[in-house]
């Protein structure tokens, strides 16, 4: 298996040893523009919630317009390293610029990204990742606060960062959008707004060539539509709403947090022909994630068992939040995130249980990959949500150093939570053959997926 026509291009990706900080990302972009004023320009297209400028770099003047934005979720910096590579590669490679105008956002959520910088330089273990992890609640996520109206759901309160990204989309009117996300644990998979069968062979071959496993277990969300193994239709708010309408309880609008995605916004902005891509890649992987061997349990049994296991995490968090309520008085992003995720996940788990009970295909034997996704990787993602609560306690302790009963309760609860987190991490490690993935191959896969899609003939040329 080879990289085909992309081998030389992918080989030029540097051997990155760590992820850059926000300050380093912006300084690097400014240097590229300062050194190449006839080819590149930079502007602030908006500000973050905390008032930091959000920058966009333009390189090239061709009619085909391409927009790539990094860190719409601030715990996902692989795409930020791709943007750093492209900033330099587009200056060097005239053919990559030819006929194109590139618009690159090095970091669309600087506030949230700074809360993840503690793990950016490693060590790359699930424990260190969890100890420094931050993911905002949906109402504070760039990718899920676009305005929309669908059936009974309405949202028109985009956060400041989302307004900046809307400004970029409205100004550029792109033919291609690369929303630079990544997963945390599992295998490689993709989202596309349009089917592109001409690219599927490369989308499988490029990660496999680098020793990455494809994600062939349960999809990230039960309403996902599969175009091809490990290639899915880009999710929209309507997809989520319709699933909850079938399997949830009550009005889906009462369950859905935040707003719409950038994929929704492309459609509502009249950019129906714009092709958008997401390449989801993990920091950690295990071979079980693509093992199609059947096991003794049915798919239904595995999903319901997985909900029961991750429900234990929710039980712990609900108890901790109740005990901490009188003492966690500091309004932090970390506390808001945990407090919002717990009730949302409870409702989502209930809908997933009804889906697993009533949907077609649930009596079939589950595969090793489906069990790995549902039982162990699902626990990993819940562990990450739980890991933000001790960090919220640390923030409270930093401003309240008195040695009274409140201080003691905070210390005790932090210890209890870390004990649970250690146990859950141990369970995951005992059941999966975990390895960390180097940064260079991850950036190569994101770059290669983009090149394959641009070569597929599916992206308008201007």
Image (cartoon, helix red, strand yellow):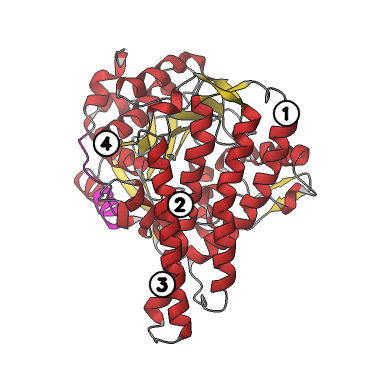
Residue 384 disc label = 2
Contact (CB < 8 A) between labels 1 and 4? no
- How far apart are the alpha carbons under marks 3 and 1? 44 Å
Residue 395 disc label = 3
Disc nearer the start of the sequence (1/2): 1
- How far apart are the alpha carbons under marks 1 and 4? 38 Å
Q: Position of residue 136 (x, y in %)?
A: 50, 56
The residue beneath circle 1 is: 359
Disc nearer the start of the sequence (1/4): 1
Per the image, label 3 sits on a secondary structure element best described as helix
Disc nearer the start of the sequence (3/1): 1
The residue beneath circle 4 is: 438
- The answer to whether residue 167 of the structure is visible from this angle is no
The foreground one among 35 and 443 is: 443
Q: Position of residue 110 (x, y in %)?
A: 39, 57
The local crowd at label 2, few if under 14, some if 14 to 19, many if 20 or more residues have their Cα within 10 Å, is many
Tell me the quadrant of the picture where the N terminus can be found.
top left
- The correct choice, above or below, for 105 with respect to 233 in the image is below
- How far apart are the alpha carbons under marks 3 and 2? 17 Å
Disc nearer the start of the sequence (3/2): 2
- How far apart are the alpha carbons under marks 4 and 3? 31 Å
Q: Is residue 397 left or right of residue 144?
A: left
Discs 2/4, front: 2
Q: Is residue 246 left or right of residue 229?
A: right
The foreground one among 112 and 118 is: 118
Per the image, label 4 sits on a secondary structure element best described as loop
Contact (CB < 8 A) between labels 1 and 2? no
Magenta residues, start to end? 14-29
């Amino acid at each position: 298996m080879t990289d085909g026509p992309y081998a030389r291009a992918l080989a030029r990706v540097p051997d990155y040893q760590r992820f850059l900080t926000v300050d380093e990302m912006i300084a690097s972009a400014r240097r590229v523009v300062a050194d190449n004023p006839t080819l590149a320009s930079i502007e602030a297209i908006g500000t973050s919630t905390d008032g930091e400028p959000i920058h966009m770099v333009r390189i090239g003047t061709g009619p085909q317009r391409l927009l790539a934005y990094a860190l719409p979720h601030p715990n996902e910096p692989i795409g930020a390293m791709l943007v750093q590579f492209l900033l330099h590669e587009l200056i060097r490679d005239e053919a990559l610029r030819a006929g194109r105008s590139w618009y690159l956002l090095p970091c669309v959520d600087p506030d949230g990204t700074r809360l993840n910088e503690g793990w950016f330089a490693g060590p790359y273990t699930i424990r260190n990742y969890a100890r420094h992890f931050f993911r905002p609640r949906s109402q504070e996520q760039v990718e899920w606060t676009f305005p929309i109206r669908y059936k009974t759901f309405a949202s028109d309160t985009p956060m400041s960062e989302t307004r900046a990204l809307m400004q970029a989309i409205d100004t550029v009117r792109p033919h291609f959008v690369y929303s630079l996300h990544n997963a945390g644990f599992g295998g490689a998979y993709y989202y596309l707004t349009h089917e592109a069968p001409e690219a599927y062979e490369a989308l499988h071959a490029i990660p496999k060539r680098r020793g990455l496993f494809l994600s062939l277990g349960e999809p990230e969300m039960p309403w996902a539509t599969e175009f091809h193994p490990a290639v899915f239709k880009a999710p929209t708010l309507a997809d989520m709403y319709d699933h909850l309408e079938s399997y949830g309880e009550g009005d889906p609008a009462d369950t859905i947090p935040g707003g719409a995605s950038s994929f929704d916004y492309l459609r509502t902005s009249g950019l129906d022909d714009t092709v958008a891509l997401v390449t989801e890649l993990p920091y950690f992987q295990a071979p079980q994630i693509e093992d199609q061997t059947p096991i003794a349990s049915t798919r239904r049994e595995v999903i319901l068992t997985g909900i029961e296991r991750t429900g234990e995490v929710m039980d712990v968090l609900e108890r901790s939040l109740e005990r901490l309520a009188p003492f966690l008085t500091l309004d932090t992003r970390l506390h808001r995130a945990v407090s919002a995720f717990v009730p949302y996940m409870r409702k989502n788990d209930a809908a997933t249980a009804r889906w697993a009970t009533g949907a077609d295909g649930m009596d079939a034997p589950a595969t090793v990959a489906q069990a790995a996704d549902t039982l162990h990787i699902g626990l990993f993602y819940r562990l990450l949500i739980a890991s933000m609560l001790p960090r919220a306690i640390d923030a409270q302790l930093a401003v309240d150093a008195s040695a009274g009963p409140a201080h003691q309760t905070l210390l005790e609860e932090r210890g209890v939570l870390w004990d649970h987190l250690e146990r859950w991490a141990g369970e995951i490690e005992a059941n999966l053959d975990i390895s960390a993935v180097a940064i260079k191959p991850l950036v190569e896969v994101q770059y290669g997926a983009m090149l394959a899609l641009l070569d597929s003939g599916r992206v308008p040329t201007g």
